[in-house]
Every structure is written in C-alpha cells, then in structure tokens.
Image (cartoon, grey):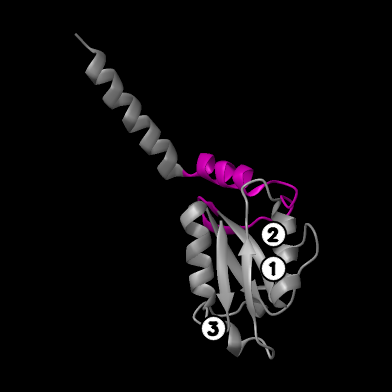
Amino acid sequence: MHIDIHDYTTLLEIQDAFSNYYPYLSLCFFTTPHGRYESSEINYEIDLHNPIDTIRKSHLSIVFEIQPFYRARDVERSFQDKTAIGLQIMMKGNEGWEQTTGLDDLTLKELNILARNASDAFIVTDYNESIDENEGNET
C-alpha cells in the first residue's frame, strides 16, 4: 500500500488509509519519537485532525510505502525519518486500542492477525458462523 502525504494531508487521512488495510491496527502520532520496545507518552499525542503543514515547519510531499511484511519498528522509524512526526502502531484489544510495545519485531500482517485473534468480536463471529454451518449440515 502507498499513502500520498503532502502539506494538507491530515493525520486522520493517513490513519484511515492504513486502517483500511489493517482493520485491527491503528496509528497514533506524537510530537516525540519513541525507542524500540518503548511506549509513547500520551501527553505528546497529536490531534488527528491536524494537517501536516501545521505540525511541520518545512514542506512535505512523499509517497509512504507500507507492506504487510514490514516490521512495526521499521514502519514507525521510516515514518519518523520521512516526516519528523513520531508514530506508534496500535492494536485492537478487548480493552480498546493498545500500543504495540514489545511487539516491534512483528510484521504488520502478524500484528493484525494477533489483534484479530484476540478480539471478542472475532470469536463471536467465528462461533456464530460455525453454528450456521452445522445447522445447514443437519438432516
């Protein structure tokens, strides 16, 4: 996937484009970067409705590439290097969105599957689908 990012792109647009490919993952943006296996300070989170030009002092026009086999740490670092905006990949959990702290070596595909498998909604959907299949097999 490729995301076109320019001065007037909002962080919400970037997050939405990412979440269309990885529905159990999300992006949070921060004024400061974080290190490998570290969490990001919630105090430094940037409002998603901000366009890039209100965050950066210099102009920006890039195509940001993200592939399923990219590791979380590499996506976060690459985004930071290209935009000077801190990025934290989040995964959906039963208690809401959680930072992927400690999971930076996993690929986006692995993180998305892990979050999907941990989701209560996924378990209920699979259970309901298996009931429907079994009802159709009864004679």
Quadrant in which the N terminus appears: bottom right
The residues bearing labels 3 and 1 have C-alpha atoms spaced at a distance of 15 Å
**Residue found at the far left of this picture:** 139
Amino acid type at circle 3 is: Pro
Q: Position of residue 111 (x, y in %)?
A: 62, 47
Residue at 43 percent of width and 40 percent of height: 122
Residue at 22 percent of width and 12 percent of height: 138
The residues bearing labels 1 and 2 have C-alpha atoms spaced at a distance of 6 Å
- Contact between marks 1 and 2 (CB within 8 A): the answer is yes
- Contact between marks 3 and 1 (CB within 8 A): the answer is no
- Contact between marks 3 and 2 (CB within 8 A): the answer is no
Question: Dot 2, crowdedness within 10 Å: few (<14), some or many (≥20)?
Answer: many
Q: Give residue 90's quadrant in the image.
A: bottom right
53 shown above or below 69: below
* Of pointers 3 and 2, the one earlier in the residue sequence: 3
Q: Position of residue 16 (x, y in %)?
A: 47, 65
Amino acid type at circle 1 is: Phe
Q: Which residue is mark 2?
A: 75
Q: Which residue is mark 3?
A: 51
Q: Is residue 45 left or right of residue 15?
A: right
Is 34 part of what is drawn in magenta?
Answer: no
- For label 1, the SS is helix
Q: Is residue 39 visible?
A: no
Residue at 77 percent of width and 62 percent of height: 38
Q: Is residue 62 left or right of residue 117?
A: right
Q: Give, as a single range, the part of the protein colored magenta.
A: 92-119
Q: Nearer the viewer, residue 24 or 55?
A: 55
